[in-house]
Image (cartoon, rainbow, N blue to C red):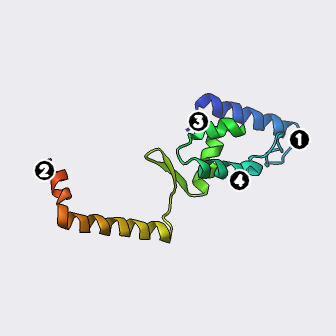
Amino acid sequence: MFSKHHRLKVAQIWFKRFQSGNFDIKDARRSGRPVTDKIDAIFEKVEQDRHISSYDVAGELGIDHKTLLAHLKKAGYTKKLDIWVPHEFTERNLMNRILICDSLLRRNETEQFLKKLITGDEK
């Protein structure tokens, strides 16, 4: 996953740390504002515009793109046909899907539009 150069650089950093007497294996706190305070803003933007690009959200909020994607995935969002949707269907989503399928089947009983789709027949 990481290049040989990257692994070597990480090993050198750890070696210097241990050589200086620092045997703490936890990463030091980094400066900067944590992304966790922007999570609500991420979901607000996605809810306002389901077609919004993840790059646009990341740019507007000043968040790393991969971090933004990780938060969306963790919250169960995925992009399907250019729309952000919950990865898991809610009960309401499932009921809507059943109702739509049922109405299409009833329509097909009177109009036979499904047969036209398969055969390409315009009659």
Q: Secondary structure at mark 3?
A: loop
Q: Amino acid at mark 1?
A: Gly
Dot 2 crowding, Cα within 10 Å, few <14, some 14–19, many 20+:
few
Q: Which residue is mark 2?
A: 119
Q: Closer to us: mark 3 or mark 4?
A: 4
**Image quadrant assignment for residue 9:** top right
Q: Of label 1 and label 2, which has the lower sequence position? A: 1
Crowdedness near tag 1: few (<14), some (14–19) or many (≥20) residues, C-alpha within 10 Å: few
The residue identified by callout 1 is 21
Q: Mark 4 or mark 1, which has the lower sequence index?
A: 1
Kind of residue indicated by mark 2: Thr
Name the disc covering residue 2, or none: 3
In space, the residues marked 4 and 1 are separated at their CA atoms by 41 Å
Of the residues shown, which amino acid type is indicated by label 4? Asp
* Secondary structure found at label 2: helix
Give left or right: position of 103 versus 19.
left
Q: Nearer the viewer, mark 1 or mark 2?
A: 2
Looking at the image, do the residues carrying marks 4 and 1 touch, with CB atoms under 8 Å apart? no
Residue 68 placement (x, y as % from top left): 64, 45
Tag 3: amino acid: Phe
Q: Is residue 63 visible?
A: no
* Local secondary structure at mark 4: helix
The residue pinned by badge 4 equals 40
Of residues 56 and 12, the one nearer the viewer is 56
What numbered label is drawn on residue 39?
Answer: none
